[in-house]
Amino acid sequence: MDMMRFNDFYLRLYNGDAKQDGPAILEDFYTLWREAESSGVDAESLHEEAKGVLQRIVAKDLFLLAACEWIGKKGHFKLGKALAHEISIRYLQHPELLKFALSETAEECATTVARRLCALDVPVAVSLGWALSMSEDLPPSQLIANTTAKVTNFLATEHPATCKRLLHAESSPFADSQVAQQLAERLASELDALEALPHLVELQMSSEMRRSFRYLRRRESRAITGRAQGESFLADMFMLSEHFKYSNQVAVEYLNDQQAVETMIPMFTHEMSVELPQTWIADPLLYGHMVAILWKEACQ
């Protein structure tokens, strides 16, 4: 199979109108994906070839339509996982919940996607935003209420700190949502109950453990920096850097019109934290069983 055909879809997405041509492009892309799978292309290579198209789909606000078609209606796990990977990269550290326009989406499709987004481990900003958008945009029904309760309970149990942070964001699009307010109150009460528990001195880190932990963090940071410099193809071409143990700047020498120029670049660190699912931390096998049930329940 000619994998270069994925480039045609990228050009169609780049040049075409997302609203007008989006459904046809997504359907053709799904057909091509299935054809590639049937021809024996492994999932990793297929995702790598289609990565540009999937990124373009997320960037052009076609995620809602793609999620409904591929995750909701067709239930294609591998394609849904590839789409979830790209949306996770884009919104991993998003500071607020996403608002989706689901007023024209079928009830069954919206509820199916809501459950399966949790099974695909997309960021909480996406999965919780979808559930709250569904409860606001679609007419009230037993299916909507049950799915919203199921999804919000799952996310509040697995990602309590992230849910609390997103619900209390100043620019949250769900500030007036009753479901969001009830969920925020539940998380606050659970936190108060947790804080009321007695603190065990035996479980606190000793000074030796804290020193060891800081040493491991510094060692990890140096390893990451060294690996990044080693993989940089520009580092050895025209730059010469000197690092000093206790400095907060790095001296960089580069060539400018056949002359060596030295400049100082401030050094800084960047850290990113992600809350892992609580059940996965305690029992990964149980968590895998839970998300598998979430995916299968959507079919029933």
Image (cartoon, rainbow, N blue to C red):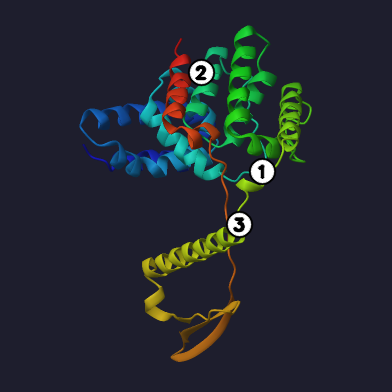
**Image quarter of residue 213:** bottom right
Q: Is residue 263 left or right of residue 25?
A: right
User: In the image, what residue occupies the spot 51% across and 39% down?
Assistant: 87
> Which sits in the foreground, 275 or 30?
275
User: In the image, what residue occupies the spot 33% across and 40% down?
Assistant: 6
Q: Secondary structure at mark 1?
A: loop
In three-dimensional space, the C-alpha distance between marks 1 and 2, rounded to whole angstroms, equals: 43 Å
Q: Secondary structure at mark 3?
A: loop
Q: Is residue 262 left or right of residue 198?
A: left
**Residue 206 got which mark?**
3
Looking at the image, tell me whether mark 1 or mark 3 is earlier in sequence order.
1
In three-dimensional space, the C-alpha distance between marks 2 and 3, rounded to whole angstroms, equals: 48 Å
Residue 47 in picture, x, y percent from top left: 35, 40
Q: Which residue is mark 1?
A: 200
**Within 10 Å of the Cα at label 1, are there few (<14), some (14-19), or many (20+) other Cα atoms?**
few
Looking at the image, tell me whether mark 1 or mark 2 is earlier in sequence order.
2
Q: Which residue is mark 2?
A: 112
Looking at the image, tell me whether mark 2 or mark 3 is earlier in sequence order.
2
Residue 30 in picture, x, y percent from top left: 36, 28
Q: Are marks 1 and 3 in contact (CB under 8 Å)?
A: no
Label 1 is placed on what type of residue? Leu
